[in-house]
Image (cartoon, grey):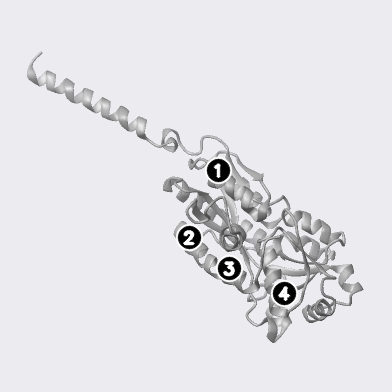
């Protein structure tokens, strides 16, 4: 064997060894096309609320686009912290996602003294799915019984009868809870807070007459409002909702004491920190594509949700702004978890 042949053989062996090392060191997601098995979307609240509604709207769209089943997994508890913690500690391989909210990633860091996860460091934002106003609503029969027809009537009754009205929420520290706390602090009224494990169970008690008032996300309450079981007194956004154009904002209906009141909610997909950018960007692209279709636009807008689908970088900045905003609301209102 001459020198040239030996050198050629050594080059082939070196290249083969290098290739083997690259394969051994490659991240898990690169060893097969992602996704090659079902993907779980953790909803940190009970079924029936807006977080659940939006996750279940997106799951089949992602399943069709990516060729694997996207499964919604409801893990309620502690204002969304239980489900969020599950995802924060999950492998960062793209197979466990979170439908996060303004509560889990905008409020809870300021409200809970000790979280088992860091909403910023332990997650990578993928995309904002939708933003929605909350709606201040009452059980229709209860409102008639108490002769409450608008926000001013409500404030008058609540101040004259402190503690007689109970306020349902989807859990302590959620945007639904904080919207009510902000209302209480700005009007000087008092209501007894009753936290539930999600909007679904809270709405059941609202419809059944066991809870008096709720500042719910509009999509989860829309059916009951249209069906006459609940009456919408106002929406909590800075502008009226196209889905309920005849319902005033809290600021409009409440007068000077509620000037500047705004407490909208948002919902978006996040993954555990360290999830490969290729996977994050692929999910964002498919969500944005789905949200841009006329059918999905019509479906969400009819429920009061405003579709987004923004980039990971834009969603990251949005979360940072929300942290600053809600930390001030928590401090100023004196809100505490029950």
Q: Is residue 131 left or right of residue 154?
A: left
Task: Depth check: give the residue in front, 150 or 336.
Answer: 336
Q: Nearer the viewer, mark 2 or mark 4?
A: 4
Relative to 134, residue 14 above or below: above
Q: Residues within 10 Å of mark 1 (few under 14, many from 20)?
A: many
N-term mark: 4 or 1? 1
Q: Residues within 10 Å of mark 3 (few under 14, many from 20)?
A: many
Residue that numbered label 4 is attached to: 184
Q: Is residue 211 visible?
A: yes
Q: Secondary structure at mark 1?
A: strand
Residue positioned 35% across, 31% down in the render = 23
N-term mark: 1 or 3? 1
N-term mark: 4 or 3? 4
* Distance from the alpha carbon under mark 3 to that under mark 2: 16 Å
Q: Residues within 10 Å of mark 4 (few under 14, many from 20)?
A: some
Q: Is residue 272 left or right of residue 198?
A: left
Task: Depth check: give the residue in front, 219 or 295.
Answer: 219
Residue that numbered label 3 is attached to: 326
Q: Secondary structure at mark 3?
A: helix
**Residue closest to the far right:** 145
Residue 10 coordinates in the image, percent (x, y): 17, 22
* Distance from the alpha carbon under mark 1 to that under mark 2: 19 Å
Marks 2,4: beta carbons within 8 A: no
Residue that numbered label 2 is attached to: 316
* Distance from the alpha carbon under mark 4 to that under mark 3: 16 Å
């Amino acid at each position: 064997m001459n020198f040239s042949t030996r050198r050629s053989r050594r080059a082939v062996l070196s290249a083969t060894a290098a290739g083997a090392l690259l394969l051994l060191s490659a991240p898990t997601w690169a060893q097969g096309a992602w996704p090659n098995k079902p993907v779980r979307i953790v909803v940190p609240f009970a079924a029936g609320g807006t977080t659940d509604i939006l996750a279940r709207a997106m799951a089949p769209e992602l399943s069709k686009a990516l060729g694997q089943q996207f499964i919604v997994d409801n893990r309620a508890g502690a204002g969304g912290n239980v489900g969020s913690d599950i995802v924060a500690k999950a492998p960062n391989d793209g197979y466990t996602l979170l439908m996060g909210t303004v509560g889990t990633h905008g409020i809870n860091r300021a409200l809970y003294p000790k979280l088992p996860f860091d909403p910023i460091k332990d997650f990578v934002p993928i995309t904002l799915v939708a933003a929605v106003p909350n709606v201040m609503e009452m059980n229709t029969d209860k409102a008639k019984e108490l002769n409450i027809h608008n926000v001013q009537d409500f404030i008058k009754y609540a101040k004259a009868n402190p503690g007689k009205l109970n306020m349902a929420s989807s859990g302590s520290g959620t945007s639904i809870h904080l919207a009510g706390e902000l209302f209480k602090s700005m009007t000087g009224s008092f209501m007894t807070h009753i936290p539930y494990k999600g909007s679904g169970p809270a709405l059941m008690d609202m419809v059944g007459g066991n809870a008096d008032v709720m500042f719910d996300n509009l999509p989860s309450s829309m059916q009951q409002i249209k069906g006459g079981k609940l009456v919408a007194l106002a929406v909590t956004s800075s502008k009226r909702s196209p889905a309920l154009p005849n319902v005033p904002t809290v600021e409009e209906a409440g007068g000077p004491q509620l000037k500047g009141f705004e407490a909208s909610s948002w919902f978006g997909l996040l993954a555990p920190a360290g999830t490969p950018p290729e996977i994050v960007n692929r999910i964002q692209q498919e969500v944005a594509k789905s949200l841009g279709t006329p059918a999905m636009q019509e479906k969400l807008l009819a429920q009061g949700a405003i579709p987004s689908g923004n980039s990971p970088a834009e969603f990251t900045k949005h979360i940072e702004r929300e942290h600053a905003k809600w930390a001030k609301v928590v401090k100023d209102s004196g809100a505490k978890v029950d």
